[in-house]
Image (tube, grey):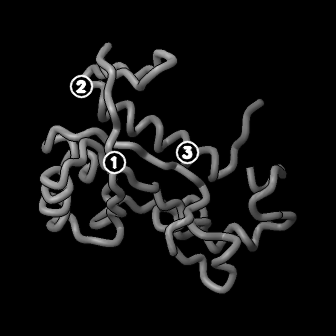
Amino acid sequence: MGYSCSCCWFSVWSILCFFYFWASVATQVSYDRRAVTIDGERKIIISGSIHYPRSTPEMWPSLIQKSKSGGLNTIETYVFWNAHEPQRRQYDFSGNLDLVRFLKTIQEQSLYAILRIGPYICAEWNYGYLSILCKGLPVWLRNLPGTRIRTYNEVFM
């Protein structure tokens, strides 16, 4: 079943970006019924969240290093659909929205990354006047005829 909406394409793009980025590392992540395994070794994931759009790229190395010094081995972040696609089919991955640069900065510190591709964001991230229901969803989505937010319908999906 193929969908042609922005939500699905954005999610696919996020996943492809992640795998393209990590392909050079050749990391295999799995689960052996007792633990997460990375390259065949059981790992305990100790993660903290850094929301890349809320800081500048110049701040990322320091924030990530402080996280590592605090004992974290993983940085997790949402992928902010409403920031990356502020207008339908117009994407922005520049400046503090440069997700690839953020992931490379994490990798340079020898940490893992977990992407939370959403589309919903529960992190005090505004949609605007409907922020309780629509955190992280682009404002333009509301204006598509037939859209019902956070439900399974053709327009939203």
N-term mark: 1 or 3: 3
* Residue 1 image offset from top left, x and y in percent: 77, 30
120 lies above or below 47: below
Neighbours of disc 1 within 10 Å: few (<14), some (14-19), many (20+): some
Type of amino acid at the residue the image marks with label 3: Ser
Name the residue carrying label 2: 24
Instruction: Report whether 76 appears left or right of 147.
Output: left
Type of amino acid at the residue the image marks with label 1: Ser
Instruction: Report whether 80 appears left or right of 42.
Output: right
* Residue 152 image offset from top left, x and y in percent: 81, 50
Q: Dot 2 lies on which element?
A: loop
Viewer-proximal residue among 148 and 91: 148
* Residue 69 image offset from top left, x and y in percent: 12, 53
Viewer-proximal residue among 92 and 42: 42
CA separation, marks 1 and 3? Answer: 22 Å
Between marks 1 and 2 in the image, the one whose residue lies nearer the viewer:
1
N-term mark: 2 or 3: 3
153 lies above or below 112: below
Name the residue carrying label 3: 11
Viewer-proximal residue among 121 and 88: 121
CA separation, marks 2 and 3? Answer: 21 Å
